[in-house]
Image (cartoon, helix red, strand yellow):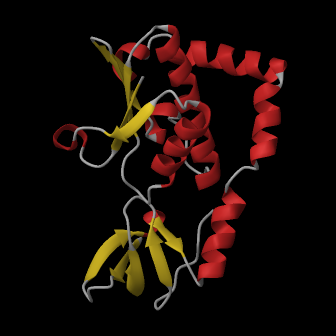
Amino acid sequence: MTENFKVGQTVRFLNDPGGGTITAIEDGQAMVEDESGFSFPHPLSELVLVDTKNRESYQYNFTHEDVEERMQRNSNQRVLNKINKDFKILYKNELASSEKKRGETMEVDLHIHHLQPKHQGMTNGEIIVIQLEHFERMMRVAMKDKLRKIVFIHGVGQGVLKAEIRRLIKEYYPHCNARDAAWHQYGQGATIVEW
């Protein structure tokens, strides 16, 4: 979905924390003045329009899949069989590059371009559903292979994926401990899960 941005509108950054007000638009870029009063160029494709807190809340809720709907889909055996088949086909030769097993640690990159090469045009809600389903799948793989640590690289962004991962671990994996991964290695963009 492409927004029609205008000078004076309030926006948030899709892949970075924060936001500001559009001061100029030219050649697919917008100059965005942040709270410090400085303007910086940002690609229009990486901006999300925020008219009011109510609209932001509505857009966030609209893009998130209903939990009950997700649970029904994830408990349908026919759907689960198809997902597992697709997963095996897609990741048959990818495990060596995408998830690196180092001793007893598995590293999983949850950035959408690693999981879904053709992700252009997907909504934020669709993207996060794919990322969370891959997270859940890799948790099962790690436990089956008896790996004691798994690092999920989720990036920084607005922190939605990180928060969802932490919530799922607390709710469905209470025997696991989740914390920020080593800052010098991953910055603020990764969570390590241990059990």
Question: Residue 98, position in %: x, y?
Answer: 38, 23
Q: In this view, does 156 lie above or below 23?
A: above
Q: Say whether residue 181 is left or right of residue 120.
A: left
26 or 146: nearer the viewer: 146
Q: Residue 52: which quarter of the image? A: bottom right
Using the image as rendered, state which of residue 38 and residue 142 is in the foreground.
142
Residue extending farthest to the left is 184
Number of numbered tags placed on the structure image: 0
Q: Residue at x 41, y 42 (%)?
A: 154
* Image x and y of residue 188, in percent: 29, 49
Report x, y in % for residue 159. 44, 55
- Decide: is 40 above or below 183: below
Q: Please tell me which residue is depicted at 44% across the width and 60% down the height of the picture.
A: 158
Residue shown at the point (35%, 70%) measured from the top left: 42
Residue 77 appears in the rendering: yes
Q: Where is residue 66 in the image (x, y as percent from the top left)?
A: 76, 50
Frontmost residue, 116 versus 178: 178
Q: In this view, does 149 lie to the left or right of 164?
A: left
Residue 123 lies in what quarter of the image?
A: bottom right
The correct choice, above or below, for 140 with respect to 146 in the image is below
**187 lies left or right of 129:** left
The answer to whether any part of residue 123 appears in the image is no
Is 45 left or right of 151, judged from the image as shown? Answer: right
Residue at the farthest front position? 175
Which quadrant does the C terminus fall into?
A: top left
Q: In which quarter of the image is residue 63?
A: bottom right
The residue lying at 30 percent from left, 74 percent from top is 41
